[in-house]
């Protein structure tokens, strides 16, 4: 049996960027003959505090524990046929750990998301702390993009940037995907009760939700609706009927099934050109009409007026959401078309073969 070591930032099963990308293919890879060991830099204790303000001693201890795990990993890399790195090996400092891993790995795949090659920090640089800025540094990613046997990218735009940087020119865009057998629709498309607009994300992405604060407050003065925020943080929004739900793996499906409309706000900048559109794909799988900022990959996922709505200005956000709130038949038409696209284009059944090809390609380059 071939052996694979996955080096990733977060504990298995908690971060959407991992859960709804490569993690959900572990069973498929095992069926292809791989034994998989996962080494996450952050343990659950650090994950619970990393994006929150304060908790400095807990964060320092988390960094020390994570760095110690990476030192242990360096001692076993040669035992593996393939090393799969997501985002970085360690979050801080130079590219030293990445270079040591590359030097010892027989074959290496680097999975990169967000446009880490851009100097723009997600359009929200004024709102994120120094820890997050360090986590989003592009130095390590640049080295791994150049030296990997194969690079997996999160968007076509990022893929085009990475191809000339990789020594083999071996870069593949693989869309985020969802298990559409598990993510089943349950939306009634009815106005018998207040329509529920939903957003799902973590503390690190709440700044994108903040882009719609004024939109929701003005909208609430015109039409009744409930805003449901599914995440790992507290949130308040005066003047809006707000429900904050703590995300959990066990309740994830039910939490999203309770929505009528999904929103995917993004800043219009270079950073988001690397985003995969994961939130939109999640909403689509649940047959929810999604309203999204028209930037990056979203126009590739959403055909405006056919399977969702694309907007750019706050006025367009308000108009689109009000239309959907008032018109349940429009929600039904867009949502059902979105579900069909999710099944045929963005399901794990549709995407699995793309990962297999990348793994085979990296293996071959590693042997040569």
Image (cartoon, rainbow, N blue to C red):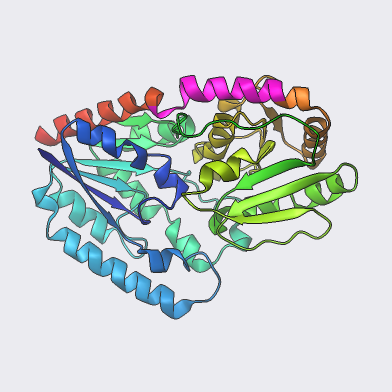
Image quadrant in which you'd find residue 285:
top right
Tell me the quarter of the image containing the N terminus: top left
The secondary structure that most of the magenta stretch takes on is helix
Q: Residue at x 70, y 54 (%)?
A: 243
Would you place residue 142 above or below residue 300 in this image? below
Left or right, 214 with respect to 254, comes to right
- On screen, residue 276 versus residue 307, left or right, reads left
Asked if one can make out residue 270 in the rendered structure from this viewpoint, the answer is: no
Q: Who is closer to the viewer here, 322 or 94?
A: 322
Instruction: Check residue 342 for magenta coloring.
Output: yes
User: Along the line of sight, which residue is nearer the eye, 52 or 135?
Assistant: 52
> What residue appears at the point 53 percent right and 41 percent down from the top-left corner?
253
Residue 21: image location, x then y, percent: 40, 39
Q: Which of the pair 147/340 is nearer the observer?
A: 340
x 90%, y 43%: residue: 222
Instruction: Name the image quarter holding the C terminus.
Output: top left
| Residue 171 lies in quadrant | top left
Q: Which image quarter: residue 33?
A: top left
In the image, is residue 99 part of the stretch drawn in magenta?
Answer: no
Residue range of the region highlighted in magenta in the rendering = 332-348
């Amino acid at each position: 049996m071939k052996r694979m070591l996955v080096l990733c930032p977060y504990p298995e099963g908690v971060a959407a960027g991992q859960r709804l990308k490569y993690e959900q293919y572990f069973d498929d890879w095992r069926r292809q003959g791989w034994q998989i060991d996962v080494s996450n830099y952050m343990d659950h204790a650090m994950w619970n505090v990393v994006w929150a303000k304060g908790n400095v001693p807990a964060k320092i201890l988390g960094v020390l524990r994570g760095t110690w795990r990476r030192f242990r990993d360096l001692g076993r890399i040669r035992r593996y046929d393939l090393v799969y790195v997501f985002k970085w090996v360690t979050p801080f400092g130079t590219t030293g750990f990445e270079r040591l891993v590359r030097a010892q790995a027989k074959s290496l795949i680097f999975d990169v998301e967000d446009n880490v090659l851009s100097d723009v920090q997600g359009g929200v640089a004024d709102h994120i702390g120094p820890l997050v800025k360090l986590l989003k540094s592009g130095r390590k990613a640049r080295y791994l993009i150049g030296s990997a046997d194969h690079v997996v990218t999160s968007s076509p735009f990022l893929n085009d940037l990475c191809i000339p940087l990789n020594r083999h020119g071996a870069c593949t865009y693989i869309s985020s995907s969802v298990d559409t057998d598990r993510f089943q629709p349950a939306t009634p498309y009815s106005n018998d009760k207040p329509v529920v607009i939903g957003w799902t994300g973590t503390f690190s992405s709440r700044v994108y939700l903040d882009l719609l604060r004024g939109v929701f407050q003005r909208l609430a003065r015109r039409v009744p609706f409930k805003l449901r925020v599914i995440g790992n943080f507290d949130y308040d929004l005066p003047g809006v009927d707000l429900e904050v739900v703590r995300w959990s793996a066990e309740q994830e499906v039910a939490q999203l099934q309770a929505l009528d409309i999904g929103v995917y706000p993004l800043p219009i900048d270079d950073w988001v050109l690397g985003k995969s559109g994961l939130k939109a794909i999640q909403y689509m799988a649940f047959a929810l009409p999604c309203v999204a900022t028209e930037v990056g990959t979203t126009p590739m996922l959403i055909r405006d007026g056919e399977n969702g709505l694309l907007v750019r200005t706050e006025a367009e956000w308000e108009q689109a959401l009000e239309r959907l709130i008032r018109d349940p038949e429009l929600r039904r038409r867009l949502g059902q078309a979105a579900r069909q696209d999710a099944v045929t284009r963005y399901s794990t059944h549709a995407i699995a073969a793309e990962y297999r090809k990348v793994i085979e390609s990296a293996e071959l380059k590693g042997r040569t």
